[in-house]
Amino acid sequence: MDDYEQFISRVKDIHKIGALQGHLGWDQETIMPPNGAQSRGEILSWLAKEQHERTTDPIIGELVEKLSKDESLNQDQRANVKEMKRRYEKASKLPSEFVAEFAKTKSEALLAWQQARSESNFEMFRPTLQKLIDMTKQKIGFYGIETTPYDVLLDEFEVGMTVEDYDPLFDGLKQRLVPLLQKIMNAKETNPDPILPEQMTFSIEGQTEFCTKVSNAMGFDFEGGRMDISTHPFSAGLWPGDTRFTTRFDEKDPFSCLYAVMHETGHALYEQGLSREHSFTPRGDAVSLGVHESQSRFWENQIGRTPAFWHVTLPWFKEQFPDSPDWTPEDLNKIANSVTPGFIRVEADEITYNLHVMLRYEIEKQIFNEDLPVDDLPKLWNSMFEEWFGLEVPNDTKGCLQDIHWSMGAFGYFPTYTLGNLYASQLLHAMSNELGDIDTIIKSGDWSSLLDWLGPRIHQEGSKWTPSELIENATGMPPSPEPFLNYVEEKYSKLYNLD
Amino acid sequence: MDDYEQFISRVKDIHKIGALQGHLGWDQETIMPPNGAQSRGEILSWLAKEQHERTTDPIIGELVEKLSKDESLNQDQRANVKEMKRRYEKASKLPSEFVAEFAKTKSEALLAWQQARSESNFEMFRPTLQKLIDMTKQKIGFYGIETTPYDVLLDEFEVGMTVEDYDPLFDGLKQRLVPLLQKIMNAKETNPDPILPEQMTFSIEGQTEFCTKVSNAMGFDFEGGRMDISTHPFSAGLWPGDTRFTTRFDEKDPFSCLYAVMHETGHALYEQGLSREHSFTPRGDAVSLGVHESQSRFWENQIGRTPAFWHVTLPWFKEQFPDSPDWTPEDLNKIANSVTPGFIRVEADEITYNLHVMLRYEIEKQIFNEDLPVDDLPKLWNSMFEEWFGLEVPNDTKGCLQDIHWSMGAFGYFPTYTLGNLYASQLLHAMSNELGDIDTIIKSGDWSSLLDWLGPRIHQEGSKWTPSELIENATGMPPSPEPFLNYVEEKYSKLYNLD
């Protein structure tokens, strides 16, 4: 075996361990019996240690050093060497025991969070959250701080992004989103949105049928994947031929399931679209969380929250719910886009969504850059929420316990959601320049040209380029908030007849 | 770390890989999307190779050599050393590449078998079956033949058992079972069994409720386990706190699900009852397939197929199926025990069941000791079946394609089913000597004393002893067919009023 073959064979083994972690994670959140938690934690911890030991094996260090200078490698091979070099250098800073212990703590924390959330009792989550934060600070210490401690975490989820990048970006967004929100709220006062009839229920079976049909129309291959139920919807691209996503059901609100399904299907289409040729290597992986999120938000909002979408799917909806009011596509679209400051991020409209993200960003900054005590977290959350959204948080389930991320030790993750929104708008813009009016395509009911456009430009490219390079290659411009701001201003001006 | 600590830490890692294989196997047979098969095979093959490499690591060899002579070890530790020594010596005879290739072939074969079975098309399974048999012969070659080639396989599933043991055992069983069967068939001619009304259907929901209640009453902890659906019911003790079993449903026949559930719950109770203290070591594993099967058959037949069982559960049954005929517990018991030579082993009564096992045993002997060509297998099956059961096999789904085992490369496995039947009767016999009349206990509806009796004598003992030692310790006599023969003769004489 030559050096590259040796290298890639080891890389694939490391990825297989990652795939196993993904599989057990999926199982844990969907179907695992409750008493399995402890052993599951043990196994996940062991896998994390195994993966870490293999990633930091000195042989990997020697190989990436040698291969970094090898001019004969092609573009794909270079991408694998570059990414593994980065991972080797980062991972080498963490002791194996720490990695194993952290994985175990995360597994326990997930369970504690689930219980705390269902009982809206922050106290039940506090001790493990404290432990997670302490360990995360330890991790920051291992990695070493170059600018601020929080920057170390931001870099883990979107390579190269720092507080210095996010602060002005978020400020810029705020400057145009807050006045837009104000205008919308004013317009709503005299002309309120239609709503779902309070008495009506939508059967789980009907929702399942309807959402499956939508997911299918988007291009999800159910022969190579599954849809299941979990508290917090997510998508897991286990390995070629097996991509799974989850949703949840609310009998009073069929939109909760629908947009979760469209969102997760967006993620899942990325996973199903990755290059099989490069399976189990970085080149065959999705490039970043921001880009991943662009795929889910694209389908959820820019396709799913349009009159054109409801034009096609209203008959499917009617078939499952024949007793629903005599809605037009425009009515349903208005309900689906209703701008209402609410407690739950994943149910937020496109305007307030980014405010939710920024709130978490500000709190995380305080935790890691200013040592905010964990005990103060709910209080801070609630007071900031009241200030930003004008709403008093009634309980922690609707407040600081709503998201799964902290229980997974994923601090620094949230800002990638906003990046996803920005990238999605850039993609829509570029796509419409090439394919013509997107509404016309959606209305036709055949959406395959959209997926066909994304495939070679995003999905199949895997991690060949950095996220910025990928977005620039696909859209002809570097990452920018302009297309997103133009998109929401135009969309909501039309929806609410703003001047 | 001292030698034993080093040893046991490695042993636990090897067992964790085994647990992952079990988890993926469970997933593959219950919920995996069809296109996931290829990658699943790759991952399973990789895990098999990893497990094999670690089992045959020379360090394991050195450690078991040293520890075998260490007088300071306690009984539990000795059991671990002894079993790992056996595995090390066996596994060292197989090349890693062979192990990986075999695992991959088995994974492909499972899929081919499922398709072939559903279309009753042996030809679809033939090529992979051929490959499996060829590879199994190769494996026999690696291990080395001491007596006959088939003995090498028998030993894999019940250590120490050979053709020389099974041939006379099976002959002895045949000598008393065949005349008993004849007597029963004669008695049935003038006095046929009651049957399920042909027009009646039993809802899946009702069956699920009823069977869950029974499984619960047997002692299965649903907080530490799951019940799911698969083509071929099975049980998988994944790891502490997570034991899963499956069943299948037939709307025309609620007994198909019920007795699958009782059977698999029997296996699952063994897994849930293993000593947690010894998790991920041989000492904490079930000792053998024969003993495992004794647990499933005990609950399925000796508890579940009695008038006393139906006395307790008839009201539960009526609750789910209020439109069913006005059956007495005795009626249902007669239906559940009806002796009828049929095509499917897992649905067979206790008399013909062992004939099914022997038929497979004879065929496997011919494959490995007499090189029976694969092409001749269906023909041989059908002709033997007609001779032994007096029935013409209508298609291969009811014939040689019915069982999953060959697709899993599990040749030499079937005889352990008969051992299970024998052990179960010995246990029942010993249990009634200690606890008093078992029927009275069953009728009380509180079956906990049965599980409490089995726990310390079988479950918690894990692999501390050999199967024979375990059975002798628990029952006061070495393994023997007498209690089983006495049991069936007595039971069926009563059921059919034989003289």
Image (cartoon, coloured by chain):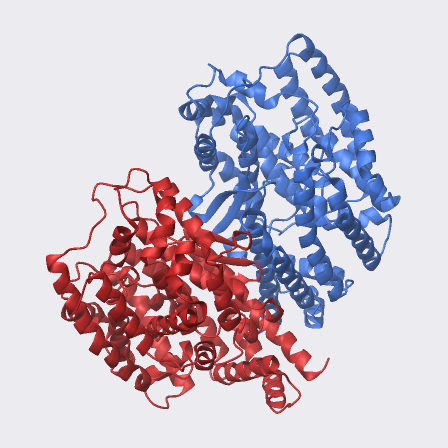
Chain colours: A red, B blue
Task: Looking at this view, name the residue that lies furthest to the right.
Answer: B370
Q: For residue A456, say whether it is visible.
A: yes
Q: Quadrant of the C terminus of chain B?
A: top right
Foreground pick, B8 / B369: B369
**x and y, in percent, of residue B136 in the image:** 79, 53
Q: Is residue B187 above or below residue A87?
A: above
The residue shown at (56%, 75%) is A283
**x and y, in percent, of residue B166 in the image:** 79, 38
Q: For residue A43, say whether it is visible.
A: no
Query: Splitting the image into 4 quarters, where does residue A318 fall?
Result: top left
Q: How many marks?
A: 0
**x and y, in percent, of residue A380 in the image:** 19, 71
Task: Looking at this view, name the residue that lies furthest to the left.
Answer: A190
Query: Splitting the image into 4 quarters, where does residue B344 fall?
Result: top right
Task: Looking at this view, name the residue that lies furthest to the top.
Answer: B190
The residue shown at (73%, 19%) is B180
The residue shown at (71%, 34%) is B480
Foreground pick, A222 / B429: A222
Q: Quadrant of the N terminus of chain B?
A: bottom right
**x and y, in percent, of residue B317 in the image:** 45, 25
Query: Splitting the image into 4 quarters, where does residue B458 fall?
Result: top right
Q: Is residue B370 above or below residue A244?
A: above
Q: Is residue B294 above or below residue B386?
A: below
Q: Is residue A150 above or below residue A230?
A: below
The answer to whether A88 appears left or right of B393 in the picture is: left
Foreground pick, B309 / A105: A105
